[in-house]
Image (cartoon, rainbow, N blue to C red):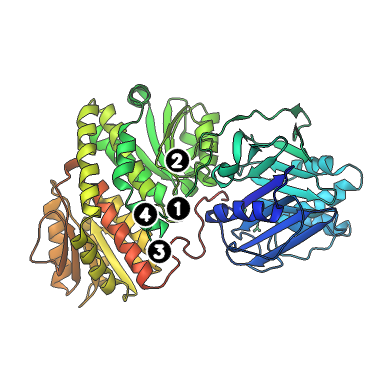
Amino acid sequence: MCGIFGYVGGERDARDAVLEGLQQLDYRGYDSWGIATYDGTLHTDKKVGAVPRTMARLPGHTGIGHTRWATHGSVTDVNAHPHAASDGSFVLAHNGIVENADELKRTLSRAGYAFNTQTDTEAIVRLVELNAKKHPLPEAVRLACRELTGRNTIIVLAKNGTVIAVKNGSPLVLGRGAERGVHYISSDVLSFSAHVREVAVLENEQMIVLEGTRVSGKTLQGRTFTPRFEKNAIVGAKVSKDGFPHFMLKEIHESGAVVRAVMKSPQKQLGDVAQVIRRARHVYCIGSGTAGAAAAQIAYYLRVYGRINATELIGAEASDRLPFFTKRDVIIAPSQSGETADVLEVLEYAQARGATIVTYVNMPGSSMSRLADHSFMAQAGPEICVMSTKIFVSQLAWGYLLAKTVGGKRKAALSALRSLARALDSFLTDASTRRRIRDAAMLFSKSNHLFLIGKGQNKQIIKEGMVKIIEGAYVHAHGIPAGDLKHYAITLMEKGTPVIAVVSKDSLQSDVLNAIHEVKARGARVFGIAPSPSPHFDSYLPTPECGETSAIFNVVPLQLLAYEMAVMRGNNVDKPRNIAKSVTVK
Ligand code: GLU
């Protein structure tokens, strides 16, 4: 995953500029960080841990930086990026995985190169060094990148102050600052938005060379190009917690607003896509992690409200389906970042086979939205907490609207979403709600494991609740489809076993209530999230009647529960251990 940042051509202190950029990028990984600057010579500082608020001075007005999510090599200062050439002629930071690193390292070792880190990145460094024996550095970088397999984006700072960046797979954007000749380079637009007026989103296999105020571009095939700048749509964007103790809580409180944003989805575009879906041979919905649960829920909505036999796919587990993609298929991908590598790879493959790609992302200019035949923007505002909450709500609301549009009931969907947004607003500002969720969290945060049960429209919701509790609270949770309970997990029910039951007033309600009976009979302690009380609930959170959008509502109390549990357990709520928000490696 990793975040890459660079600052060139201006008067700002490079350490400050890069540090500020990395602070905004650390959702991409926070195992270690590193900055290198240039003031006639190179200076580097890098350490294990999240990007700091302040650091020691590094002189110079040109610099690069990196925040790491380790894929190859443990989390140590030595493995932190940037990595230096043996002769100190440049430093290099990397986002991606060099899939042929072992092979390259073997060849380079035979050529006499030594490896001081455990990273795959060092293979790129030594390969550039080898090429630099015969070529100027930009050319050496270009030739080295041609030999890498996998998705690899890099940034290099040379000992003469030149910055070279190559985009391949993982994202990279070039920003033009307000003053002439100032350039920023980063893994995302938001990280430099306060300083940048124009943005050029780089394409795969493009290399940018920044020498002072001069910019030039070359593809890895050797063709020169001029980066195409566009107005920065999110200029001056600043992110703040708005008085909330954590971004997660703030973002959960934006649930009503994101549903209203979905209601503004362009009618014509929805209608066009609905038509494409109706005519498709097959529709696949794909995502990873939380977006995987969203994709599955979108497929559910398409089946129930669109009468479309849609199939859900998990990004990393789609390889067995690839041979079946045809030009008559539609692939729908919801994604926060629009950069998720395993999903992106499936989309690229499907597109090459002629399938139609529909994306729903929250990052303008992301790889997925640029690749899509039909790209929808969530317009949900930045989501900073590494755990996705409001974007999940947004993805579900959009999927519901799309499915209802396919079924010819767009207007009914809009009115249901309007009521949902109102219900979410009042739920989130109700003090008794918060108290009940806190009481439940108090109980659950002491457990080593807990269970969630639900059915039908709530099947993916309990899965997502499970994901949030595992991610945020580090408590083992297990989501069980209510009907499947008796086939296996019932063996684990004993006196005091904590169970969260999510119930909606629908045709499946009695099946869920039966499952609750079954766990109660074995002594489980049940917390009900339901529109009406039941004598079998030990504790209960009343939810409003939300009809078809009930599942979208129900995820919010589960998110709040995971939040409270994470706080009570003293965890780093906005940055849970070991994960990153934008998973740009496979
Ligand atoms: N593979 C590199 C490392 O482990 C970069 C990781 C990444 O981009 O996530 O250091």
- Using a 10 Å C-alpha cutoff, classify the residue at mark 3 as few (fewer than 14 neighbours), some (14 to 19) or many (20 or more): many
Residue ID for mark 1: 240
**Three-letter code, disc 2:** Asn
Residue ID for mark 2: 362
Residue at the image position 25 percent from the left and 31 percent from the top: 404
**Three-letter code, disc 1:** Ser
Residue ID for mark 4: 250
Residue ID for mark 3: 472
- Please identify, in this view, whether the residue under mark 4 or under mark 3 is nearer the observer: 4
Mark 3 / mark 1, whichever is N-terminal: 1
Mark 3 / mark 2, whichever is N-terminal: 2
Q: Is mark 3 within 8 Å of ligand 1?
A: no
Mark 2 / mark 4, whichever is N-terminal: 4
In percent of width and height, residue 203 lies at 64, 34
Mark 4 / mark 3, whichever is N-terminal: 4
**Mark 4 secondary-structure assignment:** helix
Find the residue positioned furthest to the left: 535
In percent of width and height, residue 548 lies at 19, 41
